[in-house]
Image (spheres, rainbow, N blue to C red):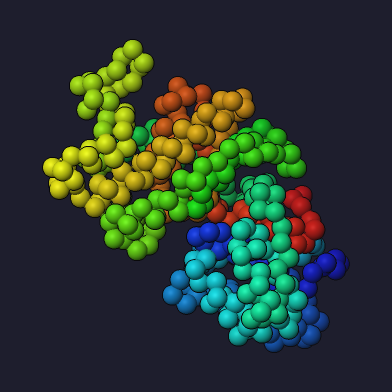
Amino acid sequence: MQSSPTEPFPWFGMDIGGTLAKLVYFEPLDISTEEKETEVDTLKTIRKYLTGNVAYGKTGIRDVHLEMTNQRLMGRTGSLHFIRFPTSEMMAFIELAKAKNFPSLASNICATGGGAYKFEQDFKLHVNLDLKKFDELDCLIKGIHYIDRNNISSECYYFKNPNEPEACEKLPFDFRDPYPYMVVNIGSGVSMLAVYSQDNYQRISGTSLGGGTFLGLCTLLTGCDTFEEAIELASQGDSKNVDKSVKDIYGGDYNKFDLPGKVVASSFGHMISKEKRESVSKADIAKATLVTITNNIASIARMCAVNQGIERVVFVGNFLRVNTISMKHIAHAMDYWSTGNLKALFLEHEGYFGAMGCLLELLKTGPP
C-alpha cells in the first residue's frame, strides 16, 4: 500500500547557485493503473521531457551517469535524476516552466541557494509561482547524508599517490560513520563546515576565492568562455612558468623550514618580469590560476581541520566537476602539508547535495 505524498507530483529540489543551478528530480516508477488513468497531461509532459532528454536547449545537461535507481521516498519507488544549467539561463528555465504549464500542477517550487532569493520575484511575476525557500547549508548536509547512504555504488573516494601520474589510483572510502568531518563546499565561493551529526554543524570559515574566481580570472586572462574550456586549457599548461618557487628565490630548498625548492613561493610571481610575460602561454596562465585557487582552498581547509581536531575533510561543489586536475592537487596539498595526517575525500555527486537536501526538506522526510 503506497503512502499518500505530502506534496503532489512532480517532486524536485532546486539549488540556485551563483554560477550553476542544480535540479534533482524524482521520477516515480511504481505508478498504478488508476494513477495512470487520472494523471493529467501536464505531469506526463514534464516527466517525459525531463527523463527523455540528456540536454535541454543549449546549456542544460542531465548527468545520466549520476542517476540513482530504486530509490524510496515517501513510500514511493523511483529514480533520482540530476540536471544542471547555468544560473545565467534562469529566465529560460522560467519560460520553460511556463511553456510546460507547471503552474497548473503546483503553486510553488522548492529552492535553496542565493538564487532562491534573487529570482523569487521573477518566478512570481512570470509564472505566478512562489519559491519555498530552504537553508542551503542545512540542505547540503542532509543531501550528503542521504546520497552517501543510498547510492548503491560507492559515493566517497580518495586519491592514492595523487602527485604521481603513473601510480595515482582512485579508491573508495567507507563514509558510513563519518562524524565528525569537515565539508569544503566549492562553488562560486567557498564555505567550510564542521559537521558533528546530520543536525549538528557549524560554518567555521570560507573564502571568496572559489570556482567563480577561477573562471572569472581565466576569461579575463586567456579569453576562454566556459568552465570546461578553462579546465582543458589548464590541463595543457605549466604553472612553473608563471609562479615563483622557493628555488627561484633561494636557489634550492629552504631546509630550515623544510620547504622543498619546487614549492610555490609566490603565485604569479614571474609575471613581474616583462620577458616572462612575453613568453608565457595562455595554458600556463590557466594552470597557474587553477593552482593558485586550489592552494588557497587546501591551505585554509587544512588549518581549519587542525583547529577543529578533524581528520576527515570532504570536498564537494561544482568546481570539482570535470576537474580531476584540481582534486588531485588538493589531495596532494592536504597530504603533504599535514604530513599524511589529513586525507582529502571527494563525493561522486559533487554539486548536487544542496538540491537533494532541498527535495528531502520539501517532502518532510529524511534518510532511512
* Residue 67 visible from this viewpoint: no
Quadrant for the N terminus, please.
Answer: bottom right
Q: Residue at x 52, y 28 (%)?
A: 303
Q: Locate residue 164, reporting x and y percent.
A: 33, 34
Query: Is 350 placed above or below 73 here?
Result: above
Q: In the image, what residue occupies the spot 55% across and 75% down?
A: 91
Residue found 31% across the figure and 43% down from its top = 288
Q: Quadrant of residue 40?
A: bottom right
Percent coordinates x, y for residue 87 in the rendering: 52, 66
What residue appears at the point 79 percent right and 56 percent down from the top-left corner?
365
Instruction: Name the residue nearer the viewer: 198 or 214.
Output: 214
Above or below 325: residue 76? below
Q: With respect to residue 97, does 169 lie above or below?
A: above
Q: Is residue 101 left or right of residue 238?
A: right
Across and down, in percent, residue 137 comes to: 66, 49
* Residue 79 to residue 178: above or below: below
Could you tell me residue 258's position as x and y percent? 35, 17
Q: Is residue 20 left or right of residue 75?
A: left
